[in-house]
Image: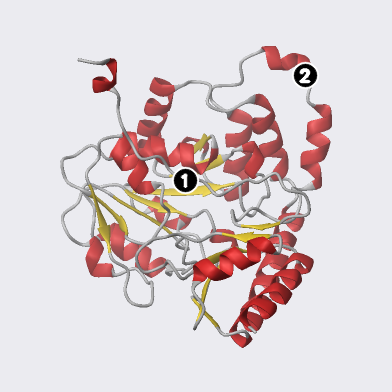
Amino acid sequence: MSWEDNVRRVVPYTPGEQPRIKNLIKLNTNECPYPPAPQVAEKLKSINYEDLRLYPDPQASALASAISGYYHVPMDQVFVGVGSDDVISMAFMAFFNSDRPILFPDVTYSFYDVWANLHGIPFERVPLDCDFKLVREGFLKENGGIIFPNPNAPTGIYEDISFVEDIVKNNPDVVVIVDEAYIDFGGKSALPLIDKYENLLIVQTFSKSRAMAGMRIGYAFGSKKLIGYLQDVKFSFNSYTMNRPSLEVGAAALQDDEYFKDVCGKIIKTRERVKGRLRELGFDFTDSMANFIFARHRTIPGKDIAGDLRLKGIIVRRWDADRISDYLRISIGTDEEMDKLLIALKEIVA
């Protein structure tokens, strides 16, 4: 017997490429093209480096309090973690422990099956329809829990709150997680439903709309009981999951709501403008309500387009996967970056 016989073997998640290439237009990881709120810069200047010798507040009180105040949700219904990935992984550990499979879409965030395999959770992928929309009936079968993004990723399609409520209402015996990483770019959050359904967990992040992917801040809302169970898992895993600077600048980021809404508005405006131009260039795409567009050309394979764009110093995301291999997920950059993308695409498809 070898020590390797006892190794847990998993196929890891493949994150978006983070190349160190100068003058690259990076449209592959859905990062915000604009800087965080000015209060973040001011807070960074005032952080006392000597305090870094001390452990951070395990309760993350400053950040949790700021989130509580901004969203008007009691603090005991707020959970924070190291990015929404950390929050969701802990939720998998806390809530998905039956022998029944958890359910998530077949085209969705590709970390879900990784977490399921890592934590030994059975799962089933529920096929989207031919228009990449969630199918209600697919989530009404017996299951051990449900998770889906809204808007979905990589499709960008948003389902309205009545759809979300229907799924939650018809699955009262399991926890339903709605991953709202992109909710600030379109649609309405299902957050009001947490007061109606004890089994609903809403997860959001600072990585997209608040331009703080580098600080790794995620958070969740749920019933007091649900959040209590999640906290128990956190403190059984690592009491100090968030560092001091993230806690402080996270709280500061919530102070300028006008700036936040202005950034979201600019990204939405650019997204809608680019949709029109892509259509003229022969692309079809879903009606994305996120900070990216999920598009394919009517005649040219996605792999060829992605390769040609890279040669022109522009990277986008694509997957060699069933149903979506010809699609490109194009993050929304600044207007200048998107104009360069459109010029490059015009040359490629001409």
Q: Residue 165 carries which label?
A: none
Q: In this view, does 238 lie above or below 315?
A: above
State whether residue 128 is above or below residue 56.
below
Identify residue type, mark 1. Answer: Thr
Crowdedness of circle 2 by 10 Å Cα count: few (<14), some, many (20+)? few
Task: Tell me the residue that label 2 is attached to.
Answer: 49
Q: Where is residue 227 in the image (x, y as percent from the top left)?
A: 40, 36
Q: Is residue 189 left or right of residue 138?
A: right
Q: How far apart are marks 1 and 2 (CA)?
A: 34 Å
- Seen from the viewer's position, the closer of residues 106 and 57 is 106
Q: Which residue is drawn at 59% across and 38% down?
A: 216
Q: Residue at image x 62%, y 26%?
A: 243
**Res 141 visible:** yes
Q: Earlier in the sequence, mark 1 or mark 2?
A: 1
Q: Where is residue 323 in the image (x, y as percent from the top left)?
A: 36, 69
Quadrant of the rendered structure where residue 267 is?
bottom right
- What is the secondary structure assignment of the residue under circle 2? helix
* Residue at image coords 16%, 55%: 142
